[in-house]
Amino acid sequence: MAELFYDDDADLSIIQGRKVAVLGYGSQGHAHALSLRDSGVDVRVGLPEGSRSRVKAEEQGLRVTTPAEAAAEADVIMILVPDPVQAKVYEESVKDNLKDGDALFFGHGFNIRFGFIKPPAGVDVCMVAPKGPGHLVRRQYEEGRGVPCIVAVEQDATGNGFALALSYAKGIGGTRAGVIKTTFTEETETDLFGEQAVLCGGTAALVKAGFETLVEAGYQPEIAYFECLHELKLIVDLMYEGGLEKMRWSISETAEWGDYVTGPRIITDATKAEMRKVLDEIRDGSFARTWMAEYEAGLPKYNEYKKADGDHLLESTGKELRKLMSWVDDER
Ligand code: NAD
Ligand code: MG
Ligand code: MG
Ligand code: MG
Ligand code: MG
Ligand code: MG
C-alpha cells in the first residue's frame, strides 16, 4: 500500500522558515507562488525581464526579480518553467546560485530522471507534483481544500529533504487532500506513459478513429461528435466516481454487453505490446531525447501535428455544435 501523508504529518513552519523562489508563473507557478504566500511563506517569483507573466505576478501582489536574483536570494528554488527549457534556466540562472544546504524543487521529474540537470551533491533535490492542473491547485487552495500531490526526494543532502517537501506540499494545500510518496523515476515514467498511452494520446486517437469510422460510413458528423467525444465526459465522470463498476451500473445492459465483447477487439494484445514499447522508449530515454531535439529545432513536427488536428472535421464540428449547447455554456 502506498504511503499517504496528511496535514497532521506535515510541519508548515519548516517552509515558513525558508526563502522560496518560484521560477516561472504559468499554470503551476502562479498556483504555488500565491498559495505559499497565503500560507505565510517568504516567496519571490523569478521571471526574465520583459516576460509577460511579470505584470500578472506583480498585480497579484508578488515580488518579481530575475530568475538569477531569485535563485540567489532563496534557499528553496522551485523550477516551474516548461520542462524543455528547465536545463537552460538551470545553467544560466540557478547553478551558480546554489549553496550547500539549499533545496532544488521540481513539479515533474523529467530533467532529473533523464540527466539534463545534474545538481551538486550538497543540495536537497525534491519534487512536489500536484496531480491536477495549476488553476485547480489554486482554486482548491482558496476554497480551503487541496489537490492531491505526490512527493519525492532524489537527493537528501541535509537529511531533512522529505520533511521539507511535505511542508511545501502543505503550503499549497496538498496535504489537505493527501500526499503520496514516490520517486523521481516512478513519477516521471508513469506520468509520461499515462499522458501518452491513455489520457491524452490514447484517448485522442480513440475519439478520432471512432468519429472517422462513423463519418466515413455516411453518418452525420454532429451525431458522430456526440457519440465519440461529447458523451465521453459523462462516462469518465462515472468512472472517476466509482470505477468501471459504477459506469457499468449506469449504462444499459446492451451497452455493458458491447463493452465486454467489443472493447478487447479495439484495444488488443497488439495494442498492449505497443504500449510496452512506448514504456521502453520512455525508460531508455529515447522519448526524452527526441522531444528535446524537436524542441531545440523550433518544433517543426509539433506544429505540423497541431495544425493537422486543428483542421480535423471533429474539431470544426465540435466548435459549431458547442455554441448551440446551452448546458456546456453553463459549465464554462
Ligand atoms: P507553463 O507553460 O504554464 O508556464 C511556464 C512559465 O515559465 C511561464 O510563466 C513562462 O513565462 C515561464 N518561462 C518560460 N521560459 C522561461 C525562462 N527562460 N525563464 C524563466 N521563466 C520562463 O508551465 P506549467 O504547465 O506550469 O509547467 C511547469 C512545470 O510543472 C513542468 O515541470 C510541468 O511538467 C509541471 N506540471 C505541470 C502541470 C500543469 O498543470 N500544467 C501539472 C503537473 C506538473
Ligand atoms: Mg502548460
Ligand atoms: Mg501527469
Ligand atoms: Mg506530464
Ligand atoms: Mg449512446
Ligand atoms: Mg446497467
Image: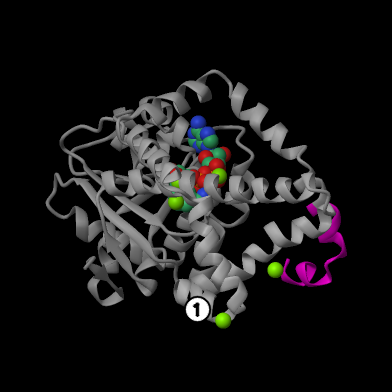
- Give the vertical position of 288 relative to 1 (above or below): above
Q: Is mark 1 within 8 Å of ligand 6?
A: no
Q: Position of residue 87 (x, y in %)?
A: 39, 29
Q: What residue lies at 36% left-to-right and 25% top-to-bottom?
A: 91
- Residue at the spot of label 1: 246
Quick one: label 1, few (<14), some, or many (20+) residues within 10 Å? some
Looking at the image, residue 323 lies above or below residue 92 = below
- Residue 207 location in percent, x, y? 64, 51
Can you give x and y, in whole percent of width and height, for residue 269 in the image?
A: 41, 46
The type of residue carrying mark 1 is: Lys
Residue drawn 29% across the image and 29% down it: 115
- The reply, left or right, for residue 191 in relation to residue 137 is left
- From the viewer's perspective, is residue 250 above or below residue 186? below
Q: Quadrant of the C terminus?
A: bottom right
Left or right placement of residue 233 versus residue 317 in this view: left
Q: Is residue 155 visible?
A: yes
Scheme of colours in the image: one colour
Name the residue nearer the viewer: 12 or 271: 271
Q: Is residue 50 left or right of residue 170?
A: right
Identify the main secondary structure in magenta: helix
Specify whether residue 233 is painted magenta.
Answer: no
Identity of the residue drawn at 38% across and 74% down: 176
Q: Quadrant of residue 50?
A: top right
Splitting the image into 4 quarters, where does residue 2 fall? bottom left
Q: Name the side, left or right, on which 316 lies relative to 290.
A: right
Q: Measuring from the top left, give residue 297's x and y in whole percent.
A: 54, 18
Judging from the image, what secondary structure is the residue with disc 1 in? helix
Q: Residue sitting at 50 percent across and 71 percent down?
A: 239
Residue 322 magenta-drawn?
yes
Region of the chain picked out in magenta, as a range = 318-332
Tell me if I can see residue 138 in this picture.
no
